[in-house]
């Protein structure tokens, strides 16, 4: 699942940086996540996390890409919920990683956007797999 997500989301981060495209929706979604990150509402946190990543994808205004991402969105939600329920990543840490993605996109740093986007996904994947393997 993280492989498919990475193919879509990392490429999207790079393309957004190349285009210098950071929408108000992505920034609003990030702020909503930051707000949720201070509470204990796991469902709200997961929804805000998904909304941030969806906003990045939707920023490209590609119906096909948005549809491709939506195919895996329920699996993404499940993984995010597992990560949060098991306290595998602190919400503040996720917010910081999201901010790095935003900064790279805003700065037009194509390679950096790809690197931080991929790092963000690999961090969550590694922690989840270690947890599941016990």
Image: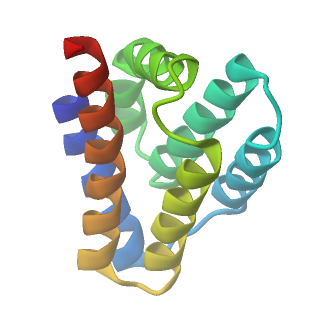
Judged left or right of residue 123, residue 34 is right
Question: On the image, which quarter does residue 72 sit in?
Answer: top left
Q: Position of residue 107 (x, y in %)?
A: 47, 87
Residue at 51 percent across and 43 percent down: it is 53
Residue at 49 percent across and 70 percent down: it is 100
Viewer-nearest residue: 14 or 66: 14
Residue at 83 percent across and 34 percent down: it is 39
Color encoding of the figure: rainbow
Question: On the image, which quarter does residue 23 sit in?
Answer: bottom right
Q: Position of residue 28 (x, y in %)?
A: 76, 54
Residue 1 visible from this viewpoint: no
Residue at 56 percent across and 32 percent down: it is 50
Judged left or right of residue 80, residue 118 is left
Quarter holding the N terminus is: top left
Q: Position of residue 130 (x, y in %)?
A: 23, 26
Q: Is residue 125 above or below residue 24?
A: above
Q: Is residue 6 above or below residue 25?
A: above
Total count of labels: 0
Q: Position of residue 109 (x, y in %)?
A: 35, 83
Judged left or right of residue 124, residue 43 is right
Q: Is residue 129 above or below residue 113?
A: above
Residue 79 visible from this viewpoint: yes
Quarter holding the C terminus is: top left
């Amino acid at each position: 699942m993280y492989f498919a997500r990475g193919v879509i989301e990392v490429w999207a981060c790079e393309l957004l940086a190349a285009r210098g495209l950071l929408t108000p929706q992505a920034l609003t979604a990030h702020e909503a996540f930051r707000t949720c990150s201070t509470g204990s509402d796991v469902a709200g946190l997961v929804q805000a996390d998904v909304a941030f990543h969806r906003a990045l994808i939707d920023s490209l205004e590609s119906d096909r890409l948005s549809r491709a991402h939506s195919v895996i969105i329920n699996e993404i939600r499940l993984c995010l919920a597992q990560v949060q329920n098991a306290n595998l990543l602190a919400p503040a840490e996720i917010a910081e990683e999201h901010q790095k993605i935003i900064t790279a996109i805003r700065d037009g740093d194509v390679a950096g956007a790809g690197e931080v986007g991929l790092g963000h996904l690999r961090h969550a994947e590694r922690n989840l797999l270690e947890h599941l393997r016990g």
